[in-house]
Image: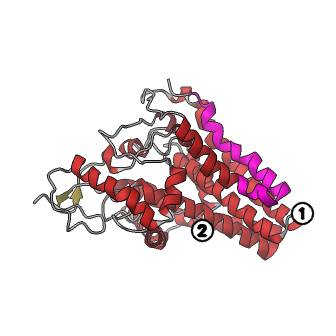
Amino acid sequence: MPAPALPFWMSLSLVPLILLAALNGGWWLAAVTTYTIVVITFLDAVLSHDTSNADPMTQDRHLFWHKLVTWVWPPMQFVIVFGAIWWAVNGTLERWEAIALFAVIGVATGAIGINFSHELIHQRNRWEPRLGEFLLTMVCYGHFRSEHVLVHHRYVATPRDPVTARYNESFFTFFPRVLWQQVVSGFRAEAALLARKGKGAWDASNPYWRYIIATALFAALAYLIGGLFGLGLFALQAFVAVLYLELTNYIEHYGLTRRHLGDGKYEHVKPHHSWNANHRVSNWFLINLQRHSDHHYKPDRRFPLLQAYDETDAPQLPFGYPVMTVLALNPLLFRRVMNKRVKAWRRRFYPDITDWSDYKAGTNPQPR
């Protein structure tokens, strides 16, 4: 049976911290960041890694309480974002406190909201992916659904995937690159699907229309509640959420690549093409997102059923995502920590490749 559902509800513990920050301002505004980075990392260090695995064939009926946490968050996020805009305009916060509050809310809409949307958009029914879109368009990033499902999972760890961070590429180069390339690659993938049906790229059935309209409606609501200041706060939380997402994307595949088989073909995706982390508490908080190696190997698995891998099957991150995302903001330190691990990964999984001097932009050289 899968692990108990209750620990995975840990994500919702951010809600009372955000409420206290909104009501009290001041030092309470640092509570969410302190909790997500310091407290969770400390607990990760104190508690053992979790390498237990549920039976991947477990039926959905045994996962109701696990799934429920991803279903209750979207309306909660809506109330948090737009209730906080009203409070920022009509409540007791100073203007700088309101701005700081929405940076904090952006951590929640990124670390929880986008993470939960990631779980939802991979489901095979109709309504859960739409619930994922609801969360994504609340942070102005609806196109992530198209790009992630149609492009990233197909081309991960190859030069054709914008989201695979290249060896030695800093986050500050990666971030502006993927912001634009994801929009374009996702649109091209949707246009290709429509072309097979004999429809134009801007046909009404293109989901990009939904993303644009939903984002515009959320922005309009923010303006109606709080005017230009409210719209600015909405944009701020969206930016912080996207920043957190792309920091996560950056570390998940940094420096890894699939073997090129020739004629533009690559080997099948395997667990060793994603960085894995078995840190117990951050995996509770992030609903097993750090078991990313198995997610790419079997994308349709619900998060409670994702399998843990050790270093024999997948490369391991030295810390959980909360620390790794902070490290990514310091390119020199990040390279010092990660480049030696990329080189060890090359020796373990591709020992026949002895000359990596041609390694550019994610390209995997042929054995010499």
Residue 133: x %, y % from top left: 58, 55
Residue stretch rendered in magenta on the structure: 4-31
- The alpha-carbon separation of the residues under discs 1 and 2 comes to 34 Å
Q: Is residue 130 visible?
A: no
User: What element does badge 1 sit on?
Assistant: loop
Asked if the magenta segment contains residue 187, the reply would be: no
User: Looking at the image, which residue sits at the far top?
Assistant: 1
Residue at the far left in the pictured view: 368
- For residue 167, side relative to residue 37 (left or right): left
Residue located 39% across and 49% down the image: 275
Identify the mark nearer the N-term, 1 or 2.
Answer: 1
When asked about the image quadrant of residue 151, the answer is bottom left
Count of numbered badges drawn on the protein: 2
Q: In this rendering, is residue 15 above or below 52? A: below
Is residue 9 visible in the rendered structure shown here?
yes
Residue under pointer 2:
212
Give the dominant element type of the magenta stretch: helix, strand or loop: helix
Residue 92 is tagged as 1
- Observer-nearest of 341 and 265: 341
What residue is rendered at 25% in x and 64% in y? 363
| Circle 2 SS class | helix
Front position in the image: 203 or 63: 63
How packed mark 2 is, by other alpha carbons closer than 10 Å (few <14, some 14-19, many 20 or more), is some
Q: Is residue 23 magenta?
A: yes
Q: Are marks 1 and 2 in contact (CB under 8 Å)?
A: no
Q: Residue at x 66, y 52 (%)?
A: 34
Task: Judge depth for marks 1 and 2 and give the one in front.
Answer: 1
Rendered image quadrant of residue 190? bottom left
From the viewer's perspective, is 97 left or right of 107?
right
Amino acid of disc 2? Ile
Residue 241: where, in percent of width, then height? 61, 61
The circle on residue 289 is none
